Image (tube, grey):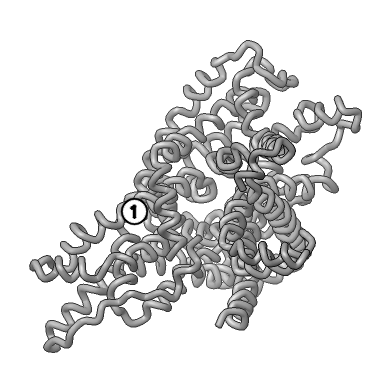
Amino acid sequence: MAAENATPRADRRRWGSTAAAVLVLGVMLFPLYWMLNTALQPEAGLLEVDPVPHRPDLSGFAKALDDQGGHLLTSLVVSLGAVVICLVIAAPAAYGLARFRLRGTRTLVFGTLITQMVPGIVIANALYTSYVDLGLVNSYAGLMLADASLGIPFSIVLMRSFMVSVPAEVIEAAQMDGAGRLRTFLQVVLPMSRNSLITSGLFAFLFAWSDFMFALTLNTTDDVKPITLGIYQYIGAHVGDWGSVMAASVLSAIPAAILLVLAQKYIAAGITGGSVK
Amino acid sequence: MTTSTVTASGAVPEAGAPVPGRLRRRLARWGFVAPAVLFMLLFFGYPLVRNVVMSFQHYTPETFFTGEAPLNGFDNWSTVFQDDVFGKALWHTLVFTAGSLLGQFCIGLALAVFFTRKFPLNGVLRSLILLPWLVPMVVSGIVWRRILDQDTGVLNSFLDTLGLGGHTPWLTDPHMALLSVILVNIWIGIPFNMVILYGGLQEVPRELYEAAALDGASAWRTFRSITLPVLRPVITVVLVLGFMSTVKILDLILALTDGGPADATQTLGTLTYQNSFVRLDFGAGAVVGNVLILISAVFAVFYLRANRTEGK
């Protein structure tokens, strides 16, 4: 290996690979660049935008914030709500399925996997009629619950695979000390499963944040309008104003970006924890 | 990522206890699982059943005021099946799914293999490819809609500069639109395929490659006889998950074309949506939704059967 490193030809070949990878990356990331580029040239309107923003103009962002800021907030509230619902429901279930010898554990885990197959639009179709009866259309609670359904099966599977590896001695020791099942779970198991909890929460957030279908189908007014729906309706109403539409699109990616940067460590840890079994 | 966990079960055996205590304990244990079971029954089980019932009911826009949706036998079914759009949507769904999976998988695999080489900045570049994940799918669709615009989109002006035409009506020509939508979906799926397949490639034992090199096997032969067989379970996972998310696609198509032009990109997902939420004929929407479920279920059966004969 070391000898190979030293030869200039091998070196050149390796940098050639880097160049090829940069090229691939350029093609893959071009749409994101173009989104940002268009957002910075709001005066271009329907005309062709320059390949590079020579004089970056932030007025598109100002307008987007003005028009869509409330929807960003709605997205944030709905997504956080969905995360809470998701974790509160999925974490105990994951523990139960990992620890207790319940009759039908396999069926339940299998059922959890099968839910991933059910098309969202079918769920929305049936859910809408029930939501009308329950008064949950155009409500925060209704959308949070629906969005939580996007993360719950994933979270159960992920956290369960993690909680299986919590040593039985630790749990037995806690129970020896007189802790009940619930206290053991809350004070021993949850802290030990922190990484998988954060990972699940993160993915649940991303699923809810990028949800468009439930937002589109379970809302008939403007009361609860997340950013995805906001942008979709924006292009209908502002055909000529691509600068603002793209600025809103950039804004819609920011919370996810911040989260991923902040929690990178936990994601990596959680994913390896989840995939190694 | 999450499929290898189905069989492991680390249950703690409980010592025998007098009956009332045991019952209480069992209830307490079920208490942990019950909320999740209830939630999944409500949000996954109930919609499945309800959709079947709804497909035999007559829904009109007034239904939601009067609450009346009388049973109407197979009316919805025959109306949907006699409509030309249904056949088109079914065909488009199959073409869209097959085309997307083929493109995503082949390019994703090629990139995964490429990134197993050692070169400077490999790790950074590999993780940067995941950046498109940050953007909600419907937003990606809107960005692409701008890029693919016939007159002012950047793709056409780029092709124009190269002298390659540059007036392609990517999304507005009924003969082009489905292909364009597939291409965008391939772009969306490449990072996922690449990441999972790359992870799988890391599991291939180095000694196998070294042995193959000693035997003088060609690169292609090595790939076919060593890499692919070891990668097989991961390939199955990628394709199954890809199928599940592609066959029910809705966001992307609504953002790009709204199912048009002239139903050229109408799929079972968009048709369900339009029947139910645009025309407010939830009965017809339920029929199309049931067909969508049926396709997924048939696929799942094949998958499970293949899995059983393959493993153990």
Q: Residue at x 37, y 40 (%)?
A: A77
Q: Secondary structure at mark 1?
A: helix
Q: Residue at x 54, y 49 (%)?
A: A213
Q: Position of residue A243 (x, y in %)?
A: 62, 23
Task: Write down the quadrant of residue B79 in the picture.
Answer: bottom right
Query: As displayed, is residue B136 above or below residue B44?
Result: above
Farthest front residue? A3
- Name the residue tied to disc 1: A197
Q: Position of residue A37 (x, y in %)?
A: 64, 23
Q: Is residue B219 toward the left or the right of residue B245 in the image?
A: right
Q: Position of residue A58 (x, y in %)?
A: 54, 16
- Chain to which the residue tagged by mark 1 belongs: A
Nearer to us in this view, B69 or B77: B77
Q: Residue at x 30, y 79 (%)?
A: A101
Query: As displayed, is residue B276 above or below residue B15?
Result: above
Farthest top residue? A55
Q: Residue at x 83, y 37 (%)?
A: B169
